[in-house]
Image: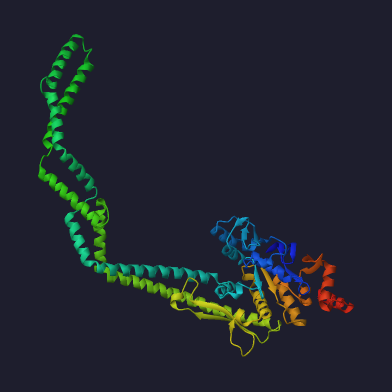
Amino acid sequence: MLNFLSIRNVVLIERLDLDFSEGLSVLTGETGAGKSILLDSLGLVLGNRAETSLIRHGADKLSVTAVFDISSVQDFISQLAKEYDLEIENEVIIKRTLDINGRSKIFINDQSVSLKVLKEFASYLVEIHGQFDNQGLLNPSFHRDILDNYGKYSEILTDVKNKFLYYQQATKEYLAYEQEIQQAKIDEDNLRCWIDELEKLKPVEGEEEEITHRRTEMMNSEKILENLNIAYNSLTVGNDIITSIRHAQGAINRANRLAEGKYNLLEETLEQTLINAQESLNQLEEMSSSINLNQNEIDHIEQRLYALRSAARKHQTSVDDLPNVLEKLKHQLSTIELGEENLEKYRLKKEQSRLDYMAAANKLSEKRKQTAKQLDEKVRSELSPLKMEKARFITNIEQMPETGWNEKGIDTVSFTVSTNPNSPQGALNKIASGGELARFMLALKVNLAETGHCQTMIFDEVDSGIGGATAQAVGERLAQLGKTVQVLVVTHSPQVAACGHHHFKVEKKTENNETTTYVYELNEISRFEEIARMLAGEQITDEARAAAKVLLTA
């Protein structure tokens, strides 16, 4: 809901701050007073084109700020805010500036945004109907959602969405498997050759590291053997370490007997040293004998390593991953051999999911047709009192080609009108004039108000070409609509103005050769005088005042 509008230096408006409330607010004033300037100003914060001709003469720039209470559209706004990383809580503050060089800046809650983002937010905040209408009901892409919201069959919509997503997934699986089979058939000869090569190679995970270490060891085998021999000779040639330890052990044993066991620990240590020394000699002998100086084995390792790495390069993988590559190739080959059988399973799944989706979508189509009939009848019942008894409103529902099916069903929905009995049905904004269009919108909105997203609606030219009882009917319906949403209407009709919950007057004054537009809310007395002026013209008569009293007390 629009709470506040601040305008600076827009055409004839120098400085204007307005507070708005719930219900129906009417704006009146003489022709040329500047009522359209208010709509132009509000249009700037809703994403309309910003032109430097709107800047007040003598000013460097203009600015417009609007404050909206978003409690009724919190979910939609929060989702948008999250998408664009904006911080928004209970209200949206939109500010737009434009300087004489044509540079425009847009802010939402003091955060700079693009014109595209502004328009997305504005679509949930305000709808303007009439000659300035640019979105909402005039955009056929919204008509299906509008009808569905009016019908209140969310469970059917959810079922259609879920079945479409399942059908979509089943189709993807089928096409992917079909492509896999086709590609596998193309590669069948290669597959068999690659599988044969890898099966003969018999790669083992971790083998590359193992044989690399083995190759390194064998290439250094002579030096390793030389050093092992040096170690062995150091322990056995000359002062044999085993003999030396035994001599020492015997001496300590004799001393220990004389000392009554004082050197038991030392004797045990020498015994363990003797065991370790003997074990070391045994290991040196075994290691020396195990060293292979066979060049043929080195060549075999080199060939094996080369074959493994060559295969890895061929399949663009690592040597350790070759066993997995072999299993994948076998799977691809088995896909060919069992492919047609499996493909048929995928096809049947896809076809069944399509049938399930079709059943749900057809159910939704029938519900839409029933809802459309109800909406058409209610809108038609509103047109006669609005002096449009010859007009026809029809919700057109057609089935899309299968390529257009989606999670919202198989239908296109469009609101069409005809203003004369012999005229063909056409789009709202192509067939109706400004005043007719506004009344069509009014007839629609009276019925759609409870299910719409926007909580502020502005009507311009809604009273164009009408008066008397018709104007009274328009006013009553605007007041009725104002019980559900906030409504602002620019009007020349006293009957419409008298139905308002709040009344603003637009007035133009010239002082010191400068013309300025002012807007202020009327109290009970000044409102009475304004409606009398609208009835009588420039000279207010007693008869006009009496008529105004009747309108205000009706």
Q: Return the x and y of residue 101 as percentages of the image width and height.
A: 63, 62
User: On the image, which quarter does residue 104 sit in?
Assistant: bottom right
Left or right: 249 as drawn, with respect to 430: left
Residue placed at 25% from the left, 51% from the top? 320
Left or right: 141 as drawn, with respect to 252: right
Left or right: 101 as drawn, with respect to 330: right
User: On the image, which quarter does residue 223 sit in?
Assistant: top left
Residue most extreme to the bottom: 422
- Camera-side residue: 518 or 374? 518
Label total for image: 0
Asked if 42 appears above or below 214 in the picture, the reply is below
- Residue 328 seen in the figure: yes
Which quadrant of the rendered structure holds the N terminus? bottom right
- Camera-side residue: 54 or 40? 54
Which quadrant of the rendered structure holds the C terminus? bottom right
Q: Return the x and y of residue 482 as percentages of the image width and height.
A: 71, 70
Residue most extreme to the top: 258
Colour scheme of the rendered structure: rainbow
Asked if 422 appears above or below 429 in the picture, the reply is below
Q: Return the x and y of residue 263 as percentages of the image width and height.
A: 22, 14
- Residue 485 seen in the figure: no
Q: Return the x and y of residue 392 as percentages of the image width and height.
A: 63, 85
Left or right: 463 as drawn, with respect to 297: right
User: On the image, which quarter does residue 388 sit in?
Assistant: bottom right
Residue placed at 66% from the left, 81% from the top? 433
- Camera-side residue: 539 or 526? 539
